[in-house]
Image: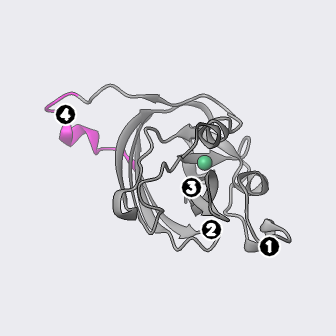
Amino acid sequence: MSRRSLALAMSLPLVAAVAAPAAAGHHGEAPEASRGAVVHQVELHALNDSGVQGKAVLVQRDGVLRVHLTARGLEPDMLHPQHIHGLPGSAEATCPPASAAGDDGVLTLVEGLPYYGGVLVDLAPYTTAPQGHINYHRTFEVTGDVADLTDEAIVVHGAFVDGQYVASLPVACGTID
Ligand SMILES: [Cu+2]
């Protein structure tokens, strides 16, 4: 992908910079760690007729968020930005309907913003989806709006449009219950 499209993907409006990589967990605390955890199962469905399908499991406890995201059907060997998006406050983020794409039928990042909102958690580092697959594990420290994930959504990006790779293009989305 070009530097330019990467820069575009990186310039998504940040609603709140609340995520930071968490320190590795201490050994010997595994039984404790599962106590009181909130688990969210998220189904990721295709946007822009991408054919991308996936799921994410989010495990949250004491301000630590573990993310396991798997997806298939992505453009192989291209960078796929992925984020937890959300609307301000407790407004419910949703996945945009096809009608949000407008006349050209291409749902851009911006056209989806009224539905899923801005980036709340940057699920970096992004993968290049070898064979079109993502298998992503990461742990984050989260505070603020993201402490309650039930009004947020996960969005995965990146696909070709008319022969040009658009890293910001939404290709899969799932709401977090
Ligand atoms: Cu995003």
Residue that label 2 marks: 47
* Element under disc 4: loop
Mark nearer the viewer, 4 or 1: 1
Cα–Cα span, label 3 and label 4: 38 Å
Residue that label 1 marks: 99
Residue that label 3 marks: 158
**Sequence-first tag of 3 and 4:** 4
Q: How many marks?
A: 4
In the rendered structure, are the residues bearing label 3 and label 2 in contact, judged by CB atoms less than 8 Å apart?
no
In percent of the image, x 68 and y 33: which residue is there? 14
Above or below, 160 relative to 53: above
Cα–Cα span, label 1 and label 3: 20 Å
Cα–Cα span, label 4 and label 1: 48 Å
Cα–Cα span, label 3 and label 2: 11 Å
Cα–Cα span, label 1 and label 2: 11 Å
Which amino acid is tagged 4?
A: Glu
**Depth check, front residue: 82 or 121:** 82
Q: How many other residues sit within 10 Å of disc 4, few (<14), some (14-19) or many (≥20)?
A: few
Residue that label 4 marks: 29
In percent of the image, x 68 and y 35: which residue is there? 11
